[in-house]
Image: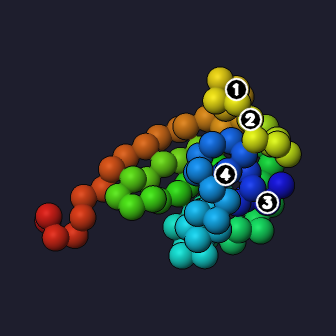
Amino acid sequence: MRLDKFLKNVGIVKRRTLAKRLSDEGNVQVDGRTAKPSTDVSPGDRIRLQIGMQIAEYEVLEVSERPVPGSERGSYARLLRSERVRPLNDM
């Protein structure tokens, strides 16, 4: 499944266009490699993304062709870690 579609379907990002933009800007990695929106993801992959000052890492558990309800999202992607980075001007 495409990375941008996966991120939207499991609710990591709200819109597929946002997932595409994050990937195009180099803010998404799959298994340690910078990923394009069309990168294939499958169970076992690790996705790391940065949105603003927030960095999160997920493990893909299962893929879904359709958006999943909020109560089932934990069955598709597991949050491994999340951290907030400080902006450069605060250092």
Q: Dots 3 and 4: beta carbons under 8 Å?
A: no
In three-dimensional space, the C-alpha distance between marks 3 and 2, rounded to whole angstroms, equals 16 Å
Q: Is residue 85 visible?
A: yes
Q: Earlier in the sequence, mark 3 or mark 4?
A: 3
In three-dimensional space, the C-alpha distance between marks 4 and 1, rounded to whole angstroms, equals 14 Å
Residue 61, picture quadrant: top right
Instruction: Say what amino acid the circle numbered 1 marks.
Output: Glu
Instruction: Say what amino acid the circle numbered 3 marks.
Output: Arg
Q: Which residue is mark 2?
A: 68
Circle 2 Cα neighbour tier, 10 Å, few/some/many (<14 / 14–19 / ≥20) = some
Q: Which residue is mark 4?
A: 7
Q: Which residue is mark 3?
A: 2
Residue 50: image location, x then y, percent:
47, 59
The residue under the point 71% across, 68% down is 37
Q: Earlier in the sequence, mark 1 or mark 3?
A: 3
Residue 62, picture quadrant: top right
The residue under the point 73% across, 51% down is 6
In three-dimensional space, the C-alpha distance between marks 2 and 4, rounded to whole angstroms, equals 11 Å
Circle 4 Cα neighbour tier, 10 Å, few/some/many (<14 / 14–19 / ≥20) = many
Foreground tag (2 vs 4): 2
Residue 35: image location, x then y, percent:
66, 68
Instruction: Say what amino acid the circle numbered 4 marks.
Output: Leu
Q: Which residue is mark 1?
A: 72
Q: Is residue 61 visible?
A: no
Residue 17, picture quadrant: bottom right
Q: Dots 2 and 1: beta carbons under 8 Å?
A: yes
